[in-house]
Every structure is written in structure tokens, then in C-alpha cells.
Image: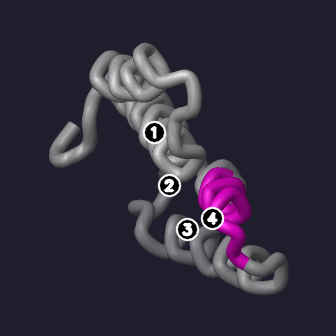
Amino acid sequence: MSDLSSVTQTRSALARLSAHNPNPDPDEIAAARASLACAKLDNRLRECARDDVQLDDVHAGHLVGLLLSICSVPGDDVIRIEKDVRAAVRAARPTGA
């Protein structure tokens, strides 16, 4: 997973934060939860790629929009970027794909 941790590693890191500490740092918990969510998404997308799942421009735009929304990107920017992603996917695909 390049420089990202695996689901097992991030799940363990999250568990360690509160295993021996009744009052874990909320910022550390939030960061560990975000890392775990990222690892899970990464695994699922890689699984789709291994299974040769072909997403189209609408799917790509939708997923990018979800990610941007989770990152607190303003709605108008999300809409614009989704549109740009759909256009980029369409333009990058070979004719007939």
C-alpha cells in the first residue's frame, strides 16, 4: 500500500490508543480513525481493480465527490471538480471504451 498502513496495522494502532489509557487524546483517536478508513477504502478499491471492475466517468466523479466532501471541500467546488473528473475520464478513455 505504498506509504499507507494496512487495515490490520491501523486497526491495531487505534486499539493501542485506548487499551491502556482511559482518556485517549481525541485528536489522536480521530487521526487513527481517519487512517483506518483510508486503509479500508484503499483495500476495497484495489480489490475492485484486481477483479477488473471497470468504473465509468459517472462512477469516478461520484467517488471523487464523496472523498472531497469527507475532506470538507465546499459544495460548489465539489460539483465543479466532479464535472472535471467525469470529463477527464471520458477524454482519457480509448475510443469505444
- Which residue corresponds to the image point at 46% horizontal and 33% vertical from the top-left? 36
Can you tell which of label 2 and label 3 is closer to the viewer? Answer: 3
The foreground one among 64 and 17 is: 17
Q: Outermost residue, right direction?
A: 75
What whole-number distance in Å separates the C-alpha atoms at marks 4 and 3? Answer: 25 Å
In this rendering, the answer to whether 24 lies above or below 31 is: above
Q: Choose the circle earlier in sequence order: 1 or 4.
A: 1
What whole-number distance in Å separates the C-alpha atoms at marks 2 and 4? Answer: 34 Å
Say which amino acid is labelled 2: Gly
Q: Outermost residue, left direction?
A: 2
Q: Report the magenta stretch's main SS.
A: helix
Q: Is mark 4 on a helix, strand or loop?
A: loop
Is 83 one of the magenta-colored residues? no
Task: Tell me the number on the disc at residue 90.
Answer: 3
Q: Choose the circle earlier in sequence order: 2 or 4.
A: 4
Q: Mark 2 sits on what residue?
A: 96
Can you tell which of label 1 and label 4 is closer to the viewer? Answer: 1
- Which residue corresponds to the image point at 57% horizontal and 32% vertical from the top-left? 23
Q: In which quarter of the image is residue 5?
A: top left
The x, y position of residue 68, in whole percent, is 64, 65
- Which residue corresponds to the image point at 56% horizontal and 23% vertical from the top-left? 22
Q: What element carries label 2?
A: loop
Say which amino acid is labelled 3: Arg
Q: What element carries label 1?
A: helix
Q: What stretch is highlighted in magenta?
A: 63-73
Q: Mark 1 sits on what residue?
A: 32
What whole-number distance in Å separates the C-alpha atoms at marks 1 and 3? Answer: 36 Å
Q: Mark 4 sits on what residue?
A: 71
Instruction: Left or right? Give the position of 94 relative to 53.
Output: left
Q: Choose the circle earlier in sequence order: 1 or 3.
A: 1
Q: Are marks 4 and 3 in contact (CB under 8 Å)?
A: no
